[in-house]
Amino acid sequence: MIKYSDCLAEWLCQLGYTHCFYVGGGNIMHLVESLSRQMPCIPVIHEVAAGIAAEYFNALHPDKKALALVTAGPGLSNIVTAIAGAFAESRELLVIGGQVKTADLSRGKLRQRGIQEIDGVSLVQSITKCAERWDAPVDYDTFYSRISQSWEGRKGPVFIEIPIDVQGIKVEFISKLDQITPTPHSGISEGDWTQLRHYLSQATRPLILVGGGVDQRVAQSLFPSWTTIPIATTWNGADRISADHPLYVGRPNTWGQRSANLILQQSDCVIALGTRLGMQQTGFNWQEFVPHGVVIHVDIDPAELEKGHPRIDLPICADANDILRRLATISDIDCSDWIQYCRMIRSEIPVFEPVNTTGGDFISPYHVVETLSTLSGNDDVVVPCSSGSAFTIMMQVFTQRGAQRIITNKGMASMGYGLSGAIGAAFAAPGQRVILVEGDGGFAQNLQEIGTAAINQLNLKIFIFDDSGYASIRMTQRNYFGGRYVGCDRETGLGLPNWQKLFDAWGVPAMRVNRGFELTESFQSLFNSTGPAAFIVSVDPDQTYFPKITSRILENGQIVSNPLHLMTPELDETRWHRVAKYIK
């Protein structure tokens, strides 16, 4: 007979869990003690960091798993944003929460009976695949059936709440577990494959759009010998193919690369693999997504195929990896003229367009990202935060190559994801350098985790775009409200720190970088060193961010957005006719 928490720890190990991110608390004391005997348990300062770090760890490591452990009450409420982010991005995440002892549960009759008691299950049911409280020990079959939902089918978070007395109860130990075969993903039906092949046979301008649902290992095994159809990626699929691949045509998006948007919008057959085709991907004017082509949408979740936007000509509920493997065997497609046209567009319109203005002695953030593309190594892990100007510039300009991994969470578009995600990535890839790029406003929201990076001496290089505030909010207030700035920078009351003094408090070396930084010995030495380091980038508060999809507010208050191919600023007429000849 052993403690139930010891049994749970053993079961988690047998399912591949190797790391735990947590903040300690009285209502998880048994779980902390048991898990710490089985795996590294990494304490973080705030619970939201535990959830984000575990999500990024799981997204990066192909075999090992990390979980997040939080105590009752505020422990759970603090991690809700991380659970929501993993849910929006279909990422694997297990969160185990503590709870007061069963005798102290209010069970809906009182607002609170036990100390720190809240109903965690009710709080997260809408943003999890499974949320349960175990008022008594469950057997292994029940345990597996709940936990495995996180990685089976469309991935997503699972939350299990365990009262403190249930954690400590004595149970009969089960040392040998029966092998349970995971439920396989569904493959494409022969009828759907026949229809897909028919559409491809009729196409002269086909395009594969690779999303995050395509496994990185599958893509890396197939694309080196890929010779048929041009490939674009979503932001979550950015690291599935190297940018120097001859058939790579970029990352389309509302904040995407103009050349990629033009190619996507001129395609006559788009096969979208493992992407939910959300409005950021299709544009808010989704009615004009691929206006003159067939859209084949492959997703494992039928709800995404039936949501009604964008227009879908052939919905296929199947594993995107299965279809990608079958597409790789096709050799009877000749779209050489289209490939040459795509290459012309890419050469005509660089990813770093010279339309932006940078004032004074500031450094262009576009130049910084372009420089990082050349300085980063083939096996670096790149974390481009999750929202704001730093994020969009990274996704527009950064040029991925080799075996680099790029991990972000744009579903919640929450500020503050970058540092916590980079910490999870650093634990998942301890032998690799992790490069984080984040805006000053976003970084400030979870800056306490500098301590986690410092005490663990993570090989993490942090680039903070310091423009003294929230650049995206400032830009919105300038463009739509005549420059009525409210709570967006230091001048309007936003309390941001002196960055170099802040990093010094944790003993993390930091330096401010300006024009020509990449040529200095001090930068090169720090960038190539082992351990955490920070680089503060002086960005113009009035920096412009183009190209982008713009909207206008009508007299009735309705917002109307341009389609993907009409980015601001518009191209001159001569160039437009060269690169948009298939747009009517």
Image (cartoon, rainbow, N blue to C red):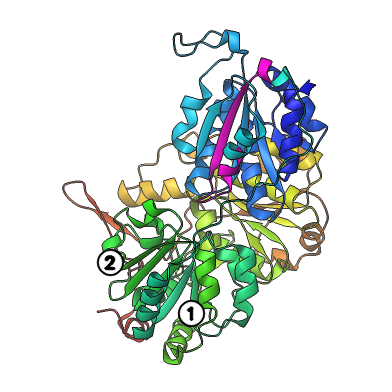
Q: Where is residue 501 in the image (x, y as percent from the top left)?
A: 72, 39
State the residue in front, 28 or 584: 28
* Residue type at numbered disc 1: Pro
Q: Mark 2 is on which residue type?
A: Glu
> Residue placed farthest to the left in the image?
556
Residue 419, given in percent of the width and then of the height, sits at: 65, 45
| Residue 295, visible in the rendered structure | yes
Which callout, 1 or 2, points to the residue nearer the camera?
1
Q: How many residues crowd around disc 2 within 10 Å: few (fewer than 14), some, or many (20 or more)?
A: some
Write down the region rendered in magenta: 147-166
Q: Position of residue 463 (x, y in %)?
A: 66, 53
The residue to which callout 2 is attached is 288
Say what secondary structure mark 2 lies in. Answer: helix
The quadrant the N terminus occupies is: top right
Count neighbours of disc 1 (C-alpha within 10 A) and say few if under 14, some if 14 to 19, many if 20 or more.
many
Q: Is residue 420 above or below residue 43?
A: below
Q: Name the residue under label 1.
A: 230
User: Does the magenta-highlighted stretch encompass residue 66?
Assistant: no
Q: In this view, does 547 lie to the left or right of 116?
A: left
Distance from label 1 to label 2 (Cα)? 21 Å
Between residue 578 and residue 279, name the one nearer to us. 279
